[in-house]
Image (tube, rainbow, N blue to C red):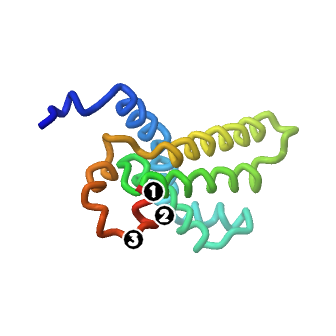
Amino acid sequence: MKSVASRFRPADLVLLLGRLLLALIFLHEGSSLAADLATTIDTFAKLGLSAPVAFATIALQIGAGISVAAGFFGRLGATALALFCLATAFLFHTNFASQNELLHFEKDLAIAGGMFVLAASGAGSISVDDLLKNRASSLHPWLRAMM
């Protein structure tokens, strides 16, 4: 039986660190939105978005953020957050006359790129997905592909 130290390569630690760093912004933002729900709903309303969209945004950021951080259906969580970042960039940050908006647009694209890379590579061996792979034979093939 291999020791824990011999199972993990430096790339596994880099994937873990990358997942945690990518997830942090979504976990923080989702938690902040949830902590002041009245203000969140009001802000969304000013953007022409309904309360259910606010709730869905909070659920996506926290749920997919945990998914990416833990590496539990990490490919699915990363894909969802990548698409969310693309939508946010193209719907809310296209006033390129504003340096701040341009920066947010580029940041959203960069985060989406990182999430797409994570979706392609998978969460690595330091993840819940890796722990469950041996038991995944009973899962639907589509769910196994998301691990």
Residue contact between numbered discs 3 and 2, judged by CB atoms under 8 Å: no
Q: Nearer the viewer, residue 15 or 135?
A: 135
Disc 1 residue type (three-letter) = Ile
Labelled disc at residue 59: 2
Q: Whole-Å distance between the Cαs marked 1 and 2?
A: 5 Å
Position above or below: 143 against 16: below
Residue picked out by circle 3: 140
**Image quarter (top left, top right, bottom left or bottom right) of the C terminus:** bottom left
- Badge 1 element: helix
Q: Position of residue 126 (x, y in %)?
A: 31, 40
- Residue occupying image coordinates x 12% and y 37%: 1
Tell me: 10 left or right of 102.
left
Q: Whole-Å distance between the Cαs marked 3 and 1?
A: 25 Å
Position above or below: 28 against 106: below
* Mark 3 or mark 1, whichever is nearer to me: 3
Labelled disc at residue 62: 1
Residue contact between numbered discs 1 and 2, judged by CB atoms under 8 Å: yes
The residue furthest top is: 10
Position above or below: 53 against 20: below
Disc 2 residue type (three-letter) = Ala
Q: Name the N-terminal-most of marks 3 and 1.
A: 1
Position above or below: 54 against 26: below
- Residue occupying image coordinates x 42% and y 35%: 15
Q: Nearer the viewer, residue 60 or 147?
A: 147
Disc 3 residue type (three-letter) = His
Q: Position of residue 23 (x, y in %)?
A: 46, 45
